[in-house]
Amino acid sequence: MISFSVHFLFCNLLISMMIGFILLAKKILGKHLSGCCQYRIWFLLPIILSLPFLSVRPAGLSQIMHWLHSMQAMLMPKNDAAVSFPVPNQLSAADRIKDFGISVTRDSAPFAAYLPFVLWVAGMPVMILFMIQSKIRLHHLEQSALPLQNPEVKLLYQKCMTEMQLQRTIPIYSTAFLRSPVMVGMFRPRIYLPIYLISDFEESDIRYILLHELQHYKHKDAFVNCLMNIAAIVYWFNPIVRYALAQARTDREVACDTFVLQMLDTSDYIDYGNTLLNFAQQIPQSPISLAAGIGGSTKQIRKRILNIASYKPQTKQHKRKERLIFAVLLVLILESTAYIPVFASNTSASLPKDAVIHTDDLSEFFADYEGCFVLYDSNADTWDIYNETLAAKRLSPNSTYKIYSALFALENQLIRPSASTLTWNGQAYPFSAWNQDQTLASAMQNSVNWYFQALDQTADFEALKKFYKTIDYGNHDLSGGVSEFWLESSLKISAVEQVELLRKLYTNEFQYDTHNVEAVKASLKLSASENSVLYGKTGTGIVNGKNANGWFIGYVETDNNTWFFATNIQGNDHADSLSAGAITRTILKAKQLL
């Protein structure tokens, strides 16, 4: 809850910036865009507003292009032969996957930490009440309205339907409880006309009004209106979003006017504008938020009149220019949204920018656990993900961090591949395997906390922080202290990031000393068979005596490919690395990788 609150607030900041970009682009390029095009730009708003609730980065244009290129990569397997490094012993995978961990005590977060989330959630029912109030008004309207009886208006309505080439019959009613004509209903569309308009019948005015309302139906504005109301509820606290929604409603009416003008003769433009002016004073904005109508605020009417006064039929050249501008804006927005989940919060992450993602349903393997599984295929350059939400969530790495603790120590010559022994200080630990001198291989195999804590404590803390930032390890937050930043504390990393870091370690994208990288890789070796070699590291988060966070990460190496994986399980108890390891091995066997 706290993590999502922070994530949501950061996303709102970036959403506001993107809305500002749209508004600025519309202001600068407005004279080159028709009213219809300016309205269509707002169709990007639902995509932008959905970003805080996405667990994995949405596809940008570059990713779509990458999907096409990846098909070629699948047909051209790579040859990723690994350099071997001696391993002290050759135990079976079942023996090597061990589960040593120390419980930490963590207090519950104070109520103040939950306050932003509570206020946000509390505000939504208030907004829903306004929607309900609008629904009640609409219900009263439906109860009081009568089917249109005026034969002249009915005939004119049929002509308008024919003129717009609409096949579906849309019921039309008259009512004394409205000052403004409206169209309502997403699944059962209907039009309501005020009685005074019918009694003061002017054919041209009624025709323009009917054409306008039918344009709302033709362009599915009832559905768009529903999305706007949902956005108004969820983002009730964000003035930038509320302003954007108001502008979108104004642009919707401008677009509707433009569609009507496209049907009229040039000589009728002034008459249509006069219709708006004549009714501007007596047609206020509809009190029914679920409806779309010809009325609006004074500011909206003014903008619409200016649009009508300056309207000219589009030339082919103007249409081409408009499409080009819209395409550029679309690409910029899509590319921008591709980055938002990455930078929006330290509590979540996303795949690399051009990742090709396949969704895996592996629920049968996780039984009673909430868990995720991420698998990266080196040759195909594709990702298989089960439970994208958890896979993108940053969690404490626990003992899986020791892979990079070892790499740091080797790079800074705290230990060497040929001389990695640290002397046991004599302190009694709860696991007998810890109570002896350790090499890198034995410390990694038995997940010896004191060995890696000693390495970290020997290092310069600023250098340590710089290292985790350089390799982009999750949120690279070491504020929890040199001895336990990795142990259900400040350092967080997602399953997606675990896999990406393992891939970079394997290919040595960090450009570290090859011998050091190979020493780390050798310490991770669990088992070897005729067709594959399994490397991995476990990690268990024990909070207040309960196993709440289980990791198993690593990779499977064959003669012609390498698969990188990360499994995480969450629970109130029994969510440990042994269970995560068993689940992983079962999945890898099912995929015929082991």
Image (cartoon, rainbow, N blue to C red):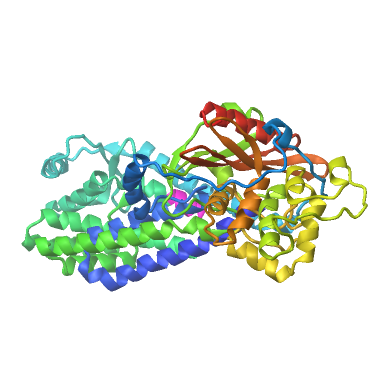
Check the picture and name the quadrant holding the C terminus: top right
216 in relation to 13, above or below: above
Foreground pick, 574 / 167: 574
- Main SS, magenta region, reads helix
Verify whether residue 234 appears in magenta: yes
Quarter holding residue 555: top right
Q: Nearer the viewer, residue 36 or 210?
A: 36
- Camera sees residue 482: no
Residue 143 visible in the shown view = yes
Q: Is residue 364 left or right of residue 434?
A: left
**In this picture, is 141 found above or below 269?**
above
Q: Residue lying furthest bottom in this view?
A: 28
Residue sitting nearer the eye, 150 or 414: 414
> Which quadrant would residue 170 be assigned to in this image?
top left
Left-right relation of 576 to 230: right
Task: Report the label total.
Answer: 0
Q: Position of residue 493 (x, y in %)?
A: 62, 52
Q: Is residue 354 above or below residue 413?
A: above
Q: Residue at x 76, y 38 (%)?
A: 99
Residue 417, above or below 97: below
Give yes or no for residue 3 being in the magenta stretch.
Answer: no
The spot of residue 27 in percent (x, y) is 31, 71
Q: Position of residue 6 (x, y in %)?
A: 61, 58
| Residue 133 in the figure: left or right of residue 207 | right
Q: Residue at x 26, y 69 (%)?
A: 30
The image shows residue 316 at horizontal and vertical percentages of 10, 60
Report the span colored magenta: 229-235
Residue 6 or residue 307, whichever sits in front: 6
